[in-house]
Image (cartoon, rainbow, N blue to C red):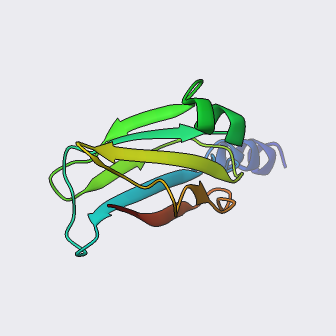
Amino acid sequence: MKTILMLTIWAMGFVHEPNQIFNTNLNVTVRDEAGNTVSGASLKLFRKEDDYLKEVNPIAEGVSDEKGMVKLKKLEPIAYWVLVRKDDKDNAGGGEMIGKLEENKLNKVTIVIQ
C-alpha cells in the first residue's frame, strides 16, 4: 500500500496544469491601394478614439517588415484604433478601427494605406 501511494505521488509530479500557451496577438498586413504589401510603414495602436485622433498614448507601435507585416503581442481582447503611415500615405478615411480581438488567438487584419 505504501509503495502504491508513493508511486501515485511520484506520477502526479509529472502531471500539471497546462500553462497558457497562446496570448492575444495581432498580425497586421499593410497594403497599398494596388494591393501590394508595404514595408517600412509605421503603425500605432490606440485604445481610445480620442487618443487616435490626437495621436497620443499609443499602446503599441511597430514598423512593417519586408512582407508588409507588423506583429503585436500580448494585447487585450478589445477593439482598437490603428494608424498606419508611410510617406504621404495613411489609412485615414477608412479602416481606422479594428474589431474586437479574439482572446488567446492570433488575430489577423489587413490595413490599406492610400
Left or right: where does residue 92 sit relative to residue 48? left
Q: Nearer the viewer, residue 12 or 76?
A: 76
Q: Position of residue 82 (x, y in %)?
A: 52, 48
Asked where in the image residue 36 lies, by quadrant, the reply is bottom left
Q: Nearer the viewer, residue 102 or 84?
A: 84
Residue that sits furthest to the bottom in the current view: 34
| Looking at the image, residue 21 lies above or below residue 31 | above
Residue that sits furthest to the right in the current view: 1
Image label count? 0
Q: Measuring 71% from the left and 47% from the top, which residue is drawn there?
A: 12
Q: Nearer the viewer, residue 11 or 1?
A: 11
Q: Position of residue 103 (x, y in %)?
A: 68, 57
Does residue 48 show up? no
Q: Nearer the viewer, residue 10 or 46?
A: 46
Q: Measuring 63% from the left and 56% from the top, which residue is drawn there?
A: 104
Q: Position of residue 5 (x, y in %)?
A: 80, 46
Q: Position of residue 92 (x, y in %)?
A: 47, 53
Q: Measuring 57% from the left and 24% from the top, which residue is drawn there?
A: 56
Left or right: where does residue 7 sit relative to residue 69? right
Asked where in the image residue 86 lies, by quadrant, the reply is top left
| Looking at the image, residue 92 lies above or below residue 110 | above
Residue that sits furthest to the top in the current view: 57
| Looking at the image, residue 113 lies above or below residue 41 | below
The quarter of the rendered structure image containing the C terminus is bottom left
Does residue 34 show up? yes
